[in-house]
Amino acid sequence: MHHRDKTACPQGHPYDEQNTRWYRGRRYCKACNCKNGNQWRERKRAELGEVLPPGLTRRQAAAKTRWALRREKFGPSGVRPEIVARLREEARLRILRNGNQHSGKTHCCRGHKYQPGSYYVGKRGNRQCKACMLIHVGQKRWRTAAEKKRAAAVVLARAYMIDVGIRANREPDSAYWRARYEAAIARWQKLKQAA
Ligand SMILES: [Zn+2]
Ligand SMILES: [Zn+2]
């Protein structure tokens, strides 16, 4: 039988339209080509001493390496900064347009009711509960700048008093440290009353 009358390759793959590659007037079996190519590549990789990290496929290992390189180049996200900025801006506009999963809520996560004046509106249209902000900074009410300054002075005076107190305790015979400690306590109490 002549070669061109055969309907299948020596391995039995059909010489149909899909599986046949014509090259310089000869037919080649695509399935065999593919298999041989893969086997050749496997051999070559073994020769070159390819080592895959355990538990990863070759594709996963390559992706891991690629992302490591990208993170080195573009920072933690591994994506070009201009693309990150564009996606952020798109997300921001989308949220402004359509709202997000919080938009329909009538109360904040701590259960304070959202009503006019009870929240701030952020850049992305998000609502920030004022009562929660107060809780977050550990205050019962808003303080003026001067009040905040006085409160900070109390914190500093207290820290100083504790430092001196430790020193005075370590040297119980030292009148000098005892006196400094008492002065620090007095100063702290005075500042606390003023605040
Ligand atoms: Zn074949
Ligand atoms: Zn709240």
Image: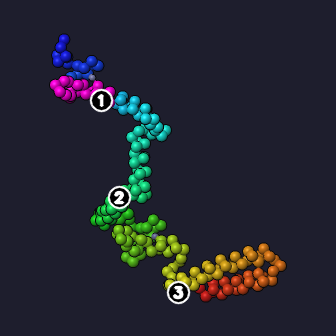
Q: Which residue is mark 3?
A: 146
* Disc 3 residue type (three-letter): Ala
The local secondary structure at tag 1 comes to helix
Q: Residues within 10 Å of mark 3 (few under 14, many from 20)?
A: few
Vertical placement of residue 137 versus 4, above or below: below
**Residue depth check, mark 2 versus mark 3: number of the one nearer the observer:** 2
Q: Residues within 10 Å of mark 1 (few under 14, many from 20)?
A: few
Instruction: Please report the residue visible at 29 percent of the width from the left and 25 percent of the height from the top.
Output: 32
Would you say the beta carbon of the disc 2 residue lies within 8 angstroms of ligand 2? no
Seen from the viewer's position, the closer of residues 144 and 73 is: 73
How far apart are the alpha carbons under marks 2 and 1? 36 Å
Q: Earlier in the sequence, mark 1 or mark 3?
A: 1
* Disc 2 residue type (three-letter): Arg
Picture quadrant where residue 13 is located: top left
Q: Which residue is mark 2?
A: 80
Instruction: Please report the residue visible at 19 percent of the width from the left and 16 percent of the height from the top.
Output: 3
- Which quadrant, please, contains the C terminus? bottom right
How far apart are the alpha carbons under marks 2 and 3? 44 Å
Would you say the beta carbon of the disc 1 residue lies within 8 angstroms of ligand 1? no
Residue that sits furthest to the right in the current view: 173
What colour scheme has been applied to the protein in the rendered image? rainbow
Q: Are marks 2 and 3 in contact (CB under 8 Å)?
A: no
Q: Which residue is mark 1?
A: 34
